[in-house]
Image (tube, grey):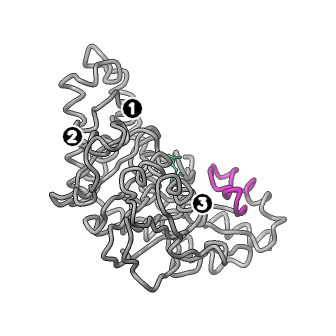
Amino acid sequence: MIHNFYAGPSIISAALLEEAATQIISRDELLSVIEISHRSKRFGDIVDELHHLTRELLALNDDHEVCYLQGGGRQQFFQIPQNFSQVFKTNYYVDTGNWANGAMKEARFFGNTEELASSKENGYRHIPNWKDDPEDAAYIYTCTNNTIYGTQFFETPKTNSHLVADMSSDLFGISRDFNAYGLFYAATQKNAGTAGACLVVVDKKMFNKPEGSVPTMIDYRTHINKKSLYNTPPVFAFVMSLLVLKWIKEKGGITYFDAANREKASLLYGELERNELFEPYANKEDRSVMNAVFTAKNEQIEKHFLDRAAKENIVGIKGHRNIGGFRASMYNALPIESVQVLVDVMQEFERTQG
Ligand code: PMP
């Protein structure tokens, strides 16, 4: 068995890969699901079910609209301000690392943009607080899970403005009040399928510009009105997302994965606290349950540990180049047994190298 800790694209349950292969090769139908028109009833049913299940799993109210787009996470960095910047208002960003920071840079193309808070001064080891709720906000932008630095928001910030969130690396992996958000999105390559699509949920109350004042392909209303079929969609990514969402529901929905992911995270962080050779990167209260980032106290052993882990079929734990060290991503499909194997290797490594 391979223990897949990659940060994204990332682990998908083996049973779903089998199911996807069957659908692609299509043994019982004449044509494969990815070689028919996206306007066919067969494909339309897939998209309907995908939308329906998304609403159900996230418990969305009637104000919230769902669409699946192309362009991954980074397209949202400019699509959000292009839709929602306003002349006499400010786009506020909470800087929790590369992803939020990258989004803030793109927002400057479209309107007045300010940093509301940042944890840059301590290397993004925590989620920053901010005192005053700005009165002139077009929106307040956050990234709920910081895939690179391994920090996560566990509470929804309180604000009278529209709250926007990049949930690319924790959507469907942790419980939240999703209706509290004006807009949230997730590229699908982590907990929501495979690379190629991005789920966007928007509260209708966000829209303030007349239709026709934003380019058609960029205006979220285009995709909402056409049920994600305005232009040819990434059909394979849609098929995979539907398979993954059905699997999430079968297992017990987000509540099930919230508990399972917290258990995996506490097993690994427990060992990181105990083990003499390693230390967790983020401050305790903000440590992500999805991506555990850690370093070796003595940098020289890092390469040896990677080699030792590879012998146990542990893959994907090399840290992001910004921090070095290690990152273990524990998305929904990663079984706790894989985390146990990692912990066992750390303990053995401590005994033999310590
Ligand atoms: N936001 C977050 C939190 C991410 O982790 C990533 C990618 N890992 C992105 C945005 C960018 O997504 P994409 O590569 O699909 O543009």
Which one is nearer the viewer's eye here, 279 or 126?
126
In the displayed orientation, state which residue is furthest to the right: 300
The crowd level at tag 1 (other Cα within 10 Å; few <14, some 14-19, many 20+) is some
Residue tagged 3: 98
Rendered view: 129 above or below 261: below
Q: CA distance from mark 3 to mark 2?
A: 32 Å
**Residue 346 seen anywhere in this rendered image of the structure:** yes
Which one is nearer the viewer's eye here, 193 or 51?
51
The crowd level at tag 3 (other Cα within 10 Å; few <14, some 14-19, many 20+) is some
On the image, the x and y values in percent for residue 215 come to: 37, 39
Residue tagged 2: 225
What amino acid is at disc 3? Asn
Rendered view: 222 above or below 258: above
On the image, the x and y values in percent for residue 255 come to: 29, 65
**Residue 144 seen anywhere in this rendered image of the structure:** no
Q: Which residues, given as a range, are shown in magenta? A: 306-324
Q: CA distance from mark 1 to mark 2?
A: 18 Å
On the image, the x and y values in percent for residue 95 come to: 55, 69
